[in-house]
Image (cartoon, rainbow, N blue to C red):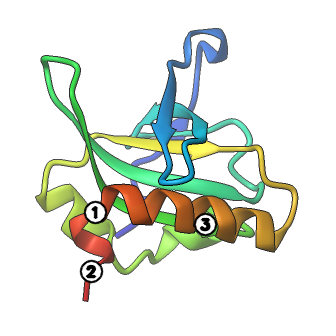
Amino acid sequence: MGLQGFAPQKNVERIPAVYWPGVSGALHLHWAFSCLELPPFAAGHFNYVFVRSMPDGERAPLFIGETANFIERMQNHEQWRNAICMGMNEVHVNLSADSFWGRRLIESDLLQTHRPPLNRG
């Protein structure tokens, strides 16, 4: 499944910012995209969260991960279909880590706090 149906992101200046708290107390800034829109920096390396956003503004993380190449990772992501079935309508991306270990630290920090259902097992 993955990127089929993705369109390039438009109106980049209107991308909502979301802060996901980690167990460390850090707030990790993520940019929220529709799961049908491709971030303009999609070839980059960053952390991501598959999210179900509700009408009341609440957001539930369904899967938390990191990647060296977002486009390649999303093309055949093993949890994409499951996330869609669970109501995923956003993908949040964090650009702050500049190394593999930096991305792993953010991923671990967020996983310990949120324990998304698709990261279990």
Q: Residue at x 24, y 48 (%)?
A: 88
Local crowd size for mark 1, using a 10 Å CA cut-off: few (<14), some (14–19), many (≥20): some
Q: Above or below — where is 67 with respect to 11?
A: below
Q: Above or below — where is 59 with respect to 88?
A: above
Q: Nearer the viewer, residue 42 or 99?
A: 99
Residue 26 in which image quadrant? top right
Identify the disc placed on residue 116. Answer: 1
Instruction: Residue lying at the far bottom in this picture: please name it.
Output: 121
Q: Position of residue 35 (x, y in %)?
A: 38, 43
Disc 2/disc 1 C-alpha distance (Å): 7 Å
Q: Position of residue 67 (x, y in %)?
A: 65, 68
Q: Amino acid at mark 1?
A: Pro
Q: Amino acid at mark 3?
A: Glu
Q: Is residue 3 visible?
A: no
Q: Above or below — where is 6 with respect to 75?
A: above
Of circles 1 and 3, which is in front? 1
Q: Secondary structure at mark 2?
A: loop
Q: Nearer the viewer, residue 84 or 62?
A: 62
Q: Nearer the viewer, residue 55 or 4?
A: 55
Whichever of labels 2 and 3 marks the residue nearer the N terminus, that label is: 3
Q: Nearer the viewer, residue 2 or 50?
A: 50
Q: Residue at x 61, y 56 (%)?
A: 47
Q: Residue under circle 3?
A: 66
Residue 72 in which image quadrant? bottom right
Q: Position of residue 74 (x, y in %)?
A: 51, 66
Q: Residue under circle 2?
A: 120
